[in-house]
Image: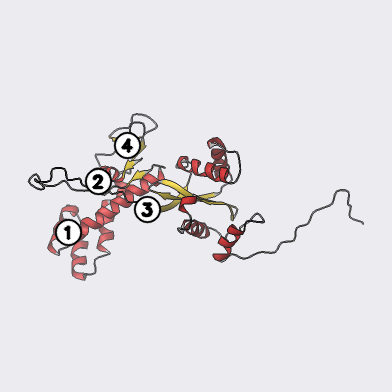
Amino acid sequence: MGVLLQDVMDHLEDTDREHSFFYDPERDRFIPEADDDECIPLYDHREINDYGMMEDFIATVQDDKAAEWLKNAIKGRGAFRMFRATCDRFGLTERWYAYRENRYRDLAVDWCLENGIAYEDIPYVPEPDDDEYVDEPETVFPRPETKEIRYGAVSRKNRLPVVLLVRDDLQEGGEDADTEDAEDVLDAYFGDGCMVFAAMENGIPVGYIAVCDARAERLYVRPEYRRRGIGTALLKMAEENTELMIDLIPGRADAEAFFRHRGYGTVELIRLRKTHGTETAE
């Protein structure tokens, strides 16, 4: 379970200069004022930036005349009203609303991921008219749940959902670990300045990678999510931020094959050890 993505979107759309909202995790609801320190602020009107949203939409309009009219419409007072009227003039209203809906959806997902909040993406299903289906009063309207994998950086702020994932990773590796051990591992990563990226399915972590000093310390994907490209995507995120080195435990043929298939090769090293009692002659 988690917040309904549509609920987050609705409150984002109701946010303006005079109205803002907070999410109360204890009561699982949005409220206009924070009751305590546990309440999480929703994006404010500056972060939502409806004006910037209109500018971005105009950049997608290929009709030069319509684009020019839209650019002029958002100058000065009454920009939002003039923009909608211009969309009507050029038959772009439906396209604008679809674009705006997708942008609000992306904002809602980003807010959930930034704050470590799982979400359910249940598409809106309109209610039938009163005179519709009069002969079938038992008609059930399905509420299909769509799922998607998103990737993002993990920080101290949104690390809590990742703790259980790290715990499962440690346990699968044969360690007798609990959630406190997993928290210690994550805190050590952050304390050492490591980068942690996670794959989230509707805000629920299903894989992660930890990178410290350009070395991939851990790469883990839940068993039921493997062979779906998640590990590759996590590795790519890490590669975009640093030039990676991979250390593997001998005998892990599966891990070696994974990295070799993605372009990694063996770097030969010479390890020197000073034998106890050996002195250099002068």
Residue name at image x 62 percent, y 66 percent: 265
Given the current orientation, which residue lies at the most extreme left position?
131
Q: Which residue is mark 2?
A: 13
Which image quadrant for residue 120?
top left
Q: Is residue 152 left or right of residue 42?
A: right
Describe the element under mark 1 as helix, strand or loop: helix
Q: Are marks 3 and 1 in contact (CB under 8 Å)?
A: no
The structure residue drawn at horizontal position 28% and vertical position 47%, both measured from the top left corner, is 122
- 3 and 2 marks in contact (CB < 8 Å): no
Q: From the viewer's perspective, is residue 216 above or below residue 67?
A: above
Residue 57 at x, y percent in the picture: 26, 60
Distance between mark 3 and mark 4 Cα atoms: 25 Å
Q: Earlier in the sequence, mark 3 or mark 2?
A: 2
Residue that badge 1 annotates: 93
Q: With 158 as the anchor, is 61 left or right in this view? A: left
Give the spatial CA distance, label 4 vs label 2: 14 Å
Cα separation between marks 1 and 2: 17 Å
What amino acid type is highlighted by mark number 3?
A: Glu
For the C terminus, which image quadrant? bottom right
Q: CA distance from mark 4 to mark 1?
A: 31 Å
Please name the amino acid that badge 2 sits on: Glu
- Quarter of the rendering occupied by the N terminus: top left
Q: Mark 4 highlights which residue?
A: 22
- Residue topped by disc 3: 148
* Label 2 packing within 10 angstroms: few (<14), some (14-19), many (20+): some
- Can you tell which of label 3 and label 4 is closer to the viewer? 3
Q: Give the residue displayed 40% in from the left and 53% down from the top.
A: 149
Residue 2 in percent (x, y) is at 35, 40
